[in-house]
Amino acid sequence: MNRFLPCSGLMALLFILNGCGPAPDAARPLALDSAAGASLPRLTAGGDDQLWLSWVEPAEGDAHRLRFSRFQKDRWGPARTVAEGRDWFVNWADFPSVVPLGRDLAAAHWLVKRPGGTYAYDVAISISTDGGESWGEPLRPHEDRSATEHGFATLFPVGHEAGDEVGGKVGAVWLDGRNMPPANTGGHAGHADHGGGMSLRFGLLSPGSGAIADKEADREADREIDPLTCDCCQTGAAVSGDGVVVVYRDRTAEEIRDISYTRFEDGRWSAPRTLAADGWRIEGCPVNGPAIDAISSAVVVAWFTGAGEPRVQVGWSADGGRNFSAPVTIDRVGVLGRVDVAMVDDDTAVVSWMAGGGDEGRAEIRYRRVDADGTLGPVRRLDTTSAARGAGFPQLAAGGGGLVFAWTRTGGDGGIATMTVPSVP
């Protein structure tokens, strides 16, 4: 595990001036049953106080496997494998998930290459109805088979009514390139703009049928939510008590790429709305999506914007994600984005992000408490890492009586670092 780096000299002075200090002394590294070279961690808090960590690690030859571990009291349990393949699309920004959805329902997703282009790939989703002990055959949530990008997926529970033995269905949103040119040129996750037309879509899967859900759900399957979005920023979703709130980076014809949101309630998506009019005009995708969490009707969203002075912001909702407050700035000192957010109660959240640490090519993982009334705690520094793509997107979740962090180590054999901070600073 990486150790905390002490403040000294000019860096110490900057930390004092910016209110940034090391993580509390009670911060504790956590051992994880993962292989050398593991990367792309994703932390997900689900129903019934479940906290799961997933990651990708190299397998035999050029294959990859998706694994996960459950947080048990104060440590990670044994690792389990969901799937393995040689035809996966593995990318620093568009990475898999293994998500507990309440009761014994869970879902996992990864990306599978499609013939026709370097950046042609599909979303594959597997469902478990026994708490992750076994996994069904992978399914595509989208009907489209074009040689374009289908990714940046987020999974969430839908229709978890009392008495439903498996706890409802699996909803998915993803960025879909079917309206774009074939993905046989250009790059991905930071590529130059390649013509526009990426859309946000929704699919619904039934754990009982092993296919697109029943006739009622079929009307929602592979449905367009927004016809034009940013190309390669992560999506996010949270259950807000009476609906699901989805956040994503939108895109206008004038290349304004601010954060938008929509609600899924009573089988319908609301019209997308801009969460905060930052007015960030940028010609290409910034690869910096929003993060969201919710407890009952309280919802918090964190995001990065490069409009004017780059900064990390949060917006709060007290009505289940129907309306959001004016944004509160979390940090503006050398911020790079790559945010995450976790609520610890209905009035308090913690935001994490990456920021330049002063050394060339290095960055700090920072975090900070924010209350619904805008009150801010001190900026804390969890660790230093690389600012390069290989460092990925540090993860944050509430669990184990405090906070749990996970991120990709850089240098050496790499691997996943995880740490717990048992109290909110």
Image (spheres, helix red, strand yellow):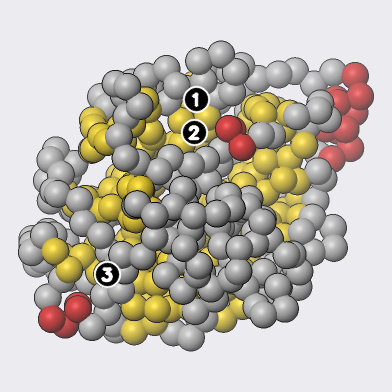
The Cα atoms of the two marked residues, 3 and 1, are separated by 37 Å
Tell me: residue 214, above or below residue 136.
below
Tell me: residue 373, above or below residue 7.
below
Q: What residue type is labelled 1?
A: Ala
Nearer mark to the viewer, of 2 and 3: 3
Say which of 173 and 300 sits in front. Answer: 173
Residue 409's x, y, as percent? 55, 24
Q: Which residue is rendered at x = 63% and y = 52% of the image?
A: 191
Residue 300's x, y, as percent? 55, 63
| Residue topped by disc 1 | 417
SS class of the residue under badge 3?
A: loop
Residue 136's x, y, as percent? 13, 48
Q: Which residue is rendered at x = 19% and y = 78% of the image?
A: 218
Query: Can residue 74 be seen in this snapshot?
Result: no
Q: How many marks?
A: 3
Residue 176's x, y, as percent? 43, 66
Tell me whether circle 2 and circle 1 mark residues in contact (CB < 8 Å). yes
**Image quadrant containing the C terminus:** top right
Instruction: Determine which of the numbered discs, if any, sits on residue 143 in the image.
Output: 3
Q: What residue type is labelled 3?
A: Glu
Query: Neighbour class for label 2 at 10 Å: few (<14), some, many (≥20)?
Result: many
| Residue topped by disc 2 | 406
SS class of the residue under badge 2?
A: strand
Query: Neighbour class for label 1 at 10 Å: few (<14), some, many (≥20)?
Result: many
